[in-house]
Image (cartoon, rainbow, N blue to C red):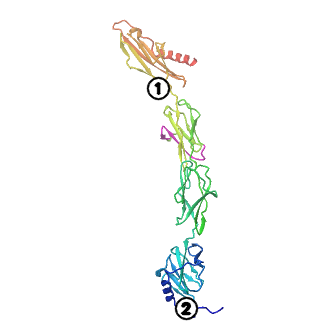
Amino acid sequence: MGSPSVPPYRWCIPWQRLLLTASLLTFWNPPTTAQLTIESRPFNVTEGKEVLLLAHNLPQNLLGYIWYKGERVDANGRIGSHVIGNQQTTPGPAHSGRETIYSNASLLIQNVTQNDTGSYTLQAIKEDLVNEEATGQFRVYVELPKPYIISNNSNPVEDKDAVTLTCEPETQDTTYLWWINNQSLPVSPRLELSSDNRTLTLLNVPRNDTAFYECETQNPVSVRRSDAVTLNVLSELPKPYITSNNSNPVEDKDAVTLTCGSEAQDPTYLWWVNGQSLLVSPRLQLSNGNRTLTLLNVTRNDTGRYECGIQDSVSAKRSSPVTLNVLYGPDTPIISPPDLSYNSGANLNLSCHADSNPSPQYSWLINGTLQQHTKVLFISKITSNNNGAYACFVSNLDTGRNNSIVKNISVSSGSSAPGNSGLSARATVGIIIGVLVGVALI
C-alpha cells in the first residue's frame, strides 16, 4: 500500500483532541452522497444475548469515531472513542464493560439487559474536520418461559358453572393467544377474553366440552406454548321419580313398596315423609342401596307425602311428592248426643260418626227396622212409641269393612201406661248382623 497522503502526525492525535475536534465541528455537517447509517443485528435482542451495531457507508479519511448512548452527542453518554491512527480505544463514562468498539466502527454489546434498550449514536471524525453522525436502536426482550394454565374450577357442572382459564405468568410486552383442540379460538358467545387476552372465560360449559385448551405467549424474540388442559365437566343429577306398587293400601292388610327411579350412576338415596327425614321403624325396610322403601302392614299414620332424593359430590335432586292414601275403617261409630232419656213431645236428633277413609256409608235401624241411609236421624215430637234400640250401621266398600253401635232410647210419656220398650240390645245386634250379611252379599 502507498503512503498516506496526509502527514503522519494527523493519524496519531490523542483521543482528547479527537473529542475536542468532534465538539468544535458538530454544528458544521454538510450533506454527503452516501449517508452514514447504523444497522442493528438483531433489532430485537433476547436478554442475555449480544447485539452488533454495524456502521454502513463510513466516510473516507477518518481520524476516528465515538459511540454514545442515546439519540444525541452527550459527554455523559459517551461509551468510548477509537483513534484510527494508533488504534487506541478509550472507554467513556457510559461504558459498562460489556461494550467492544471494532476498527470498522461497529459496536458490540454483550449480555444485554432490558436497560440497554434504546438508541445509540455514532459520531465519525474525518480528516477534513467534518463530522458525520448516525443513530441506530434496538430493543431487548426477555426470553419467555413456558406458560401454564390455571383454572378456577377444574370440575365444572354442565350448563351451570363458568370456568376461568388464566395464562401464567404475566409478563410485559407479551401477546397472549389461545388454542382449542390445536385450532385458533373460534368466535362464540360462550367464550369471553379479557382485554389483554390473558384470561379466557367459558360460560355455562356443556357436558360435551371435552376439548383441550392451550395458551401461547409471544414477544419479538420467543414463542412458547403451554401444556394442554382439559375440563372434567360433571353432569348435574337428573330429577328422580317414585313408583309405587299400591297407592291406596288397606290398613293392617297391605304392604307398600316405593321405588326411587333415577338415571344417575350410583347416587346416594334419601327419603322424606311429609318433609321430614325418614324415621327408623321396624315396619319400614330399606333395600337395594336405600333405593327401595317398603312399608309393612300400613297404618293410617303412614298416610302422607313421600319424596326420594339423590345426591353425589356435584349436586342433589329431590323427586316430586307421591301421596300414599291409606284406606281404613270404619272404626266403631259414636252416636251423639249421649243422652238416653227424652221427654215425650221433644225432638230426637241423633248424629252418627265413624272414622273411615273414605267416608263410610251410614244406615239407621230402629228396633231392627231399617229407617234411612243418612248420617243424621231426626224424629219430631217423639212419644213413648219411639222407645227402643237405635242402631247406627257404617260400612266402607273400599276396605270391605263395617261396624255398628246400638243406643237404647227411652221416652217418658207422663202417664203410668207402659210404652213400647222395643227390642233388646242383644236382639238388635242380631238384626244388625243379618243386615251386614245382606250388605256383604249385595
Q: Which corner quadrant of the image does residue 201 belong to?
A: bottom right
Q: Which residue is mark 1?
A: 355
Q: Which residue is mark 2?
A: 10
Give whichever of 359, 67 is nearer the camera. 67
Q: Which residue occupies the extreme right position in the image?
A: 1
Does residue 322 appear in this view? yes
Q: Secondary structure at mark 1?
A: loop
Q: Earlier in the sequence, mark 2 or mark 1?
A: 2
Quarter of the image with the C terminus is top right
Quarter of the image with the N terminus is bottom right
Residue 145 position (above or below residue 294): below
| Whole-percent x, y for residue 421 in the image | 42, 10
Q: Are marks 2 and 1 in contact (CB under 8 Å)?
A: no
Amino acid type, callout 1: Asp
Q: Secondary structure at mark 2?
A: helix
Within the magenta stretch, is there residue 286? Answer: no
Give whichever of 30, 344 is nearer the camera. 30
Give whichever of 265, 212 is nearer the camera. 212
Amino acid type, callout 2: Arg
Mark 2 vs mark 1: give the one in front.
Answer: 2
Is the residue marked by circle 1 packed among few (<14), some (14-19), or many (20+) residues within 10 Å? some
CA distance for labels 2 and 1: 134 Å
| Whole-percent x, y for residue 231 in the image | 59, 55
Within the magenta stretch, is there residue 267? Answer: yes
- Residue at the (58%, 17%) spot, across then down: 441
Is the residue marked by circle 2 packed among few (<14), some (14-19), or many (20+) residues within 10 Å? few
> What residue range appears in magenta?
263-278
